[in-house]
Image (cartoon, helix red, strand yellow):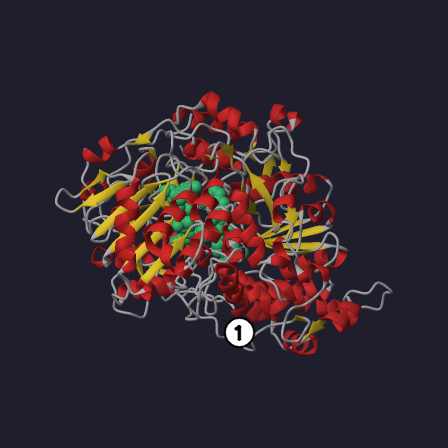
Amino acid sequence: MAETRKSIVNSPAGGWGALNATEAHLARQEILVRGNRALLSMNKPGGFDCPSCAWPDPRKPHTFEYCENGAKAVAWEATRKRATPEFFAAHTVTELSGWTDHAIEDVGRLTEPMRYNSATDKYERASWGEAFAAIGAELRALDPRRIELYTSGRTSNEAAFLYQTFGRLLGTNNFPDCSNMCHETTTVALPESIGVGKGTVDLDDFEDCDAIFIFGQNPGTNSPRMLGYLHDMAKRGVPIVTFNPLKERGLIAFANPQNAVEMLTGGGQKISSQYFQLRVGGDIAAVQGICKAVLAAAESSTGSKRILDEAFIAQHTHGFQAFATYLRNLPWERLEHYSGLCRADMETAADIYMKAERVIACWGMGITQHRRGGDAMQQIMNLLFLRGNVGRKGAGACPIRGHSNVQGDRTVGIYQKPKEPFLRRMDDVFGFNSSREPGHDVAQCCEAILRHEVDAFISMGGNFFRAIPDNARVAAEVPRLRLTVYVATKPNLSHMTHGLSSWLLPCLGRTERDVQNGQVQTITIEDSFSMVHGSVGLLEPARPHLRSEIDIVCGLARAAVADRAAIDWDAFVNDYSLIRDKIEAVFPDQFNNYNARIAQPGGFRLPNGARERKWDTPTGRANFLFKDGLIDADDDAPEAPHLQLITLRSHDQFNTTVYSNDDRYRGVRGERMVVFMNARDISALGLQEGAMIEFATVWHDDIDRRLGGFRVVAFDIPPGCCAAYYPETNGLLPLAHRDERSNTPAAKSVPVRITAVAPGEPVAADGGVAEHGRARETDPTSVPLA
Ligand SMILES: Nc1nc2c(c(=O)[nH]1)N[C@H]1C(S)=C(S)[C@@H](COP(=O)(O)OP(=O)(O)OC[C@H]3O[C@@H](n4cnc5c(=O)[nH]c(N)nc54)[C@H](O)[C@@H]3O)O[C@H]1N2
Ligand SMILES: Nc1nc2c(c(=O)[nH]1)N[C@H]1C(S)=C(S)[C@@H](COP(=O)(O)OP(=O)(O)OC[C@H]3O[C@@H](n4cnc5c(=O)[nH]c(N)nc54)[C@H](O)[C@@H]3O)O[C@H]1N2
Ligand SMILES: [Mo]
């Protein structure tokens, strides 16, 4: 068993394993032919945008412009399985709330509106008319400040724009969004550095760069199409410098399924030229160490080649001298202690950085989901500034977003702190007065629920009550809400967390043909690189006449806010290009000529000042930012016997959607209740591989956060930290443990104590939204991959 696991973990990512897994997933959803046809039209002009991650589409796509995990996402949506009214008639909500995340979604696609009936404790069939009338009547009677409108990032620009219009007509700015748990750190901290909260690179820059630094991101699983680029870069000899506590297989080696030789020989391309296994949260110190080494080299350099881009620093930046002084005084021992790297490592990275003419820095959740995530991100920007690596070909900042349209949703107005010029335009375009009161993000929404200050929760996709921190605690208060409304493709455990009245509203997925008024409609998406392009569904809808998200939002608006502005909601449903006209009217600088420009191949790029070295910051320049004493103030350092728990994704999940219980790249099969630990910690705690443990969060409040039933797996991870899957571990994550500026939950460093549980001893179960104290049943439907 150990041997097999070792050989699996040591072989390259991708390759035949990826192809076999794709086939298996399609077969399991009973859609071999249908799915394959869908896959061929994915991420191509005239086809649909992959519903999985936010990696951009190339202008000239390959025949197989899809990846294993994109294929899983399509298979999952295009499944033949259905969650029918008959299914709901056979199961009470109390029973369903004890199912696993996998089992509940695997029931299949929702087909009809369902209304919760408290007398039977079941969801029961209702008509669309009943649903809209009842929801509209409830909403009209409520204080809008007590209504929350959540969005998950799969929603199109058009649906998101109308959804926020609907919310603003209701009179609220409460728009908690999945990005509040994700890249909100970037959205808040990056503008302080460069004046814009989005990345500055595009795909061409990847082809031109001379070195790439990857911080806290696992592209092999979470943006696999990026691996194709990394693969080609590695082949060209471009150094790929990775900072990650875990050895992630996709960052070690990758066999490209589109490369015949690699497939036939079973070999793969080495990806990371350097792999720095820093300690969790060690990025601030590591990057400052690299900056310190760069500065020292510049100061002692006698050669003609300039190390710092002095012209850029002088003309374009602010705060360099203060940063340089700070770096000079930073003792190496402290940098080593807090980064978990040695000085030589940081000097090696600095050397690669200085030798490369053009450098891209990427980051993911390993940076953003920390108490000081914003500070870490700003150190990465400082490093780029030293050699003018922003706003020029082949160089720049590259935050890799999560959901396929999470960036677009924010661009078109899903924002809880709207700025005055935007609200003024909304008011002008639609003829009403929107509220100026700041709304809630995810953390504030959860706090409001805990304080009993919420009456209605509406959810445009997503799985809020599983994805949030302290999920069991927050979910326990939901039964007091007057109304919960879930617009979704498939049932999930949030739907079983219901208010006094509750509705499930089924919608079309992005892969499906959306015909309105006899015309096939196009929706639009913005990827991680700010490219906006069209997406047209091709597959037969899961059920005839299934409504689109846009149709549903318009239905809700007609029922709840028809009298508040003269808006022709029907016209929007009949022709989505009319919605784009309104988006253009509200955001003329970004979306001018919107309908015409989405017709061009690859779409169009939204303006980004920093890319042109125009800095929309208070200083009018790019800012070197740091906090004095930052490292000394870091209290995330592990103190025995506490460990820092990283909560992350397996290879077979998309957020809370669990495709199967396998994690091929980490050598785990058929189970998710595992904790990855360093061998030293395993023995220091008197445990063995395979032992059962319980987690307890070490936090300064008197809430008891404990979860049991996890099995120990030895892994290549530094001592002092451990890792386990989300959302099973979300009950351990305190709501208050979050990035200081953006409120992004610090899901990558939960301080925990681990104790052994003797066989047969009762454990505290994942009470996410299930009954407390009862272990979630193991999943009967998961089949290990062949
Ligand atoms: N197949 C698939 N694709 C997805 C998703 C999915 O669940 N499945 N989710 C989508 C979404 S919404 C998002 S946001 C992205 C998420 O994509 P990623 O950003 O890759 O997210 P994670 O898997 O949570 O973890 C990121 C990495 O951070 C590392 N890490 C943890 N702590 C630290 C640290 O302190 N420092 C550093 N340097 N590294 C650290 C972890 O070891 C892990 O490799 O992917 C998107 N794409
Ligand atoms: N501990 C911990 N917690 C985390 C994270 C972590 O790393 N660790 N990551 C955080 C991150 S980065 C994110 S983005 C959030 C994700 O949080 P969410 O975005 O809320 O969760 P998802 O799991 O992506 O939502 C899945 C559900 O979306 C619905 N759905 C799928 N497609 C569609 C569609 O086309 N339309 C509609 N209306 N519904 C659809 C389905 O019903 C499915 O069950 O979780 C966050 N939570
Ligand atoms: Mo995300």
**Disc 1 crowd, CA 10 A, few/some/many (<14, 14-19, 20+):** few
Q: Amino acid at mark 1?
A: Leu
Is residue 252 in view from this perspective? Answer: no
Residue under the image location 70 percent in, 51 percent down: 211
Give how far across and how far down residue 325 sits, in percent: 67, 78
Q: Is residue 335 left or right of residue 441?
A: right
* Position of the N terminus by quadrant: top left
Give how far across and how far down residue 251 sits, in percent: 57, 44
Q: Nearer the viewer, residue 388 or 158?
A: 158
37 to 740, vertically: above or below: above
Figure quadrant of residue 234: top right
Element assignment for label 1: loop
Q: Is residue 586 left or right of residue 784?
A: right
Residue under the image location 59 percent in, 27 percent down: 266
Q: Nearer the viewer, residue 112 or 446?
A: 112
The residue labelled by disc 1 is 630
Count of numbered tags: 1
Give the residue at the far left of this rendering: 119
